[in-house]
Image: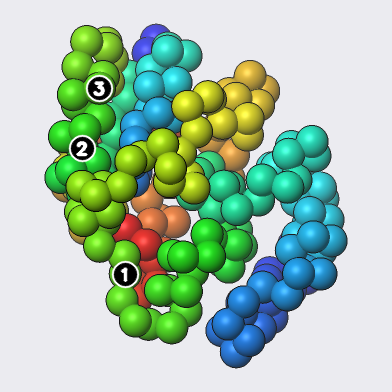
């Protein structure tokens, strides 16, 4: 767990410096981490981007995992400190069906967590929010 | 016993609705008025679900009000 935390810290720094997630990390290493912790269904590994919007009470260090795998549009806002997307304008002008995080079906990871009755995995509730607030300049809210 | 759920940053509200259909009592919150208005209109007749404007970084909700949180 400590190694994973250090690893995510390093990845976070890479993203901050490079400005993007290297494809090899996105396609190989991230899914490997997900496999180890089992929070992302193995059959849905290609949907990691969506996970960033619907992260479901992952462990402490998964907050950063979520931050660095977030959708490219939001991510660019976050990492360049140009400001957050104007959600109000976005929802007024764009059809929600075209938004990358839109899914009319029940998200597979939520469904799995619900069916396995482990939706409170990690047991962290608002403390995790407070952790996120450290990244207030970056967090899309 | 019905579990209370807070879906932070609900956006379109689709996952909030699915959670309600799964038997949870759910509140979907979002910073955007437009998103909340849309969700309230689309899901006006649904039970066990409310959509409320709220800032995730300065939430008006209390930890003790909910059993689960979706970020």
Residue A4 vs residue B56: left or right? Answer: right
> Which chain does the numbered disc 3 sit on?
B
| Residue A87, picture quadrant | bottom left
Would you say B33 lies left or right of A35 here? left
Q: Where is residue A13 shown, x and y percent of the image?
A: 62, 84
The chain holding disc 1 is A
Name the residue beneath numbered marker 2.
B36
CA distance separating discs 1 and 3: 26 Å
Q: Nearer the viewer, residue A31 or A37?
A: A31
Secondary structure of the residue carrying tag 3 is helix
User: How far apart are the two marked residues, 2 and 1, measured between alpha carbons?
Assistant: 19 Å
Check disc 2 and report its element: helix, strand or loop. helix
> Could you say where residue A136 lies in the image, as x and y percent from the top left?
34, 71
Query: Image quadrant of residue B19?
Result: top left
**Above or below B35: residue B3:** above
Instruction: Describe the colour scheme in one phrase.
Output: rainbow
User: How packed is label 2: few (under 14 Cα within 10 Å), some, or many (20 or more)?
Assistant: many
- Mark 2 vs mark 3: which is more N-terminal? 2
For label 1, the residue is A84
* Mark seen at residue B42: 3
Determine whether, in the image, residue B47 is placed left or right of residue A46: left
Q: Is residue A113 visible?
A: no
- Against A82, is B67 above or below? above
Look at 53% across and 65% down and name the residue there. Answer: A72
Image quadrant occupied by the N terminus of chain B? top left
């Amino acid at each position: 767990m400590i190694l994973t935390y250090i690893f995510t810290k390093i990845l976070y720094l890479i993203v901050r410096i490079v400005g993007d997630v290297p494809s090899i990390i996105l396609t190989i290493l991230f899914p490997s981490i997900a496999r180890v912790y089992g929070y992302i269904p193995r059959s849905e590994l290609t949907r990691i981007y969506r996970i960033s919007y619907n992260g479901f009470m992952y462990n402490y260090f998964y907050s950063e995992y979520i931050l660095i795998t977030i959708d490219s549009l939001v991510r660019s806002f976050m990492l360049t400190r140009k400001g957050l997307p104007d959600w109000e304008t976005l929802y007024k002008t764009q059809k929600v069906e075209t938004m990358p995080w839109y899914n009319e079906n029940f998200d597979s990871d939520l469904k799995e967590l619900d069916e396995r009755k482990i939706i409170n995995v990690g047991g962290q509730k608002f403390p995790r929010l407070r952790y996120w607030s450290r990244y207030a300049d970056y967090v899309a809210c | 016993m019905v579990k209370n759920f807070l879906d932070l940053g609900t956006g379109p509200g689709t996952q909030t609705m699915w959670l309600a259909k799964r038997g949870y009592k759910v509140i979907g919150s979002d910073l955007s008025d437009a998103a909340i208005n849309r969700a309230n209109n689309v899901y006006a007749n649904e039970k066990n679900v409310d959509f409320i404007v709220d800032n995730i970084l300065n939430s008006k909700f209390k930890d003790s009000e909910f059993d689960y949180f979706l970020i």
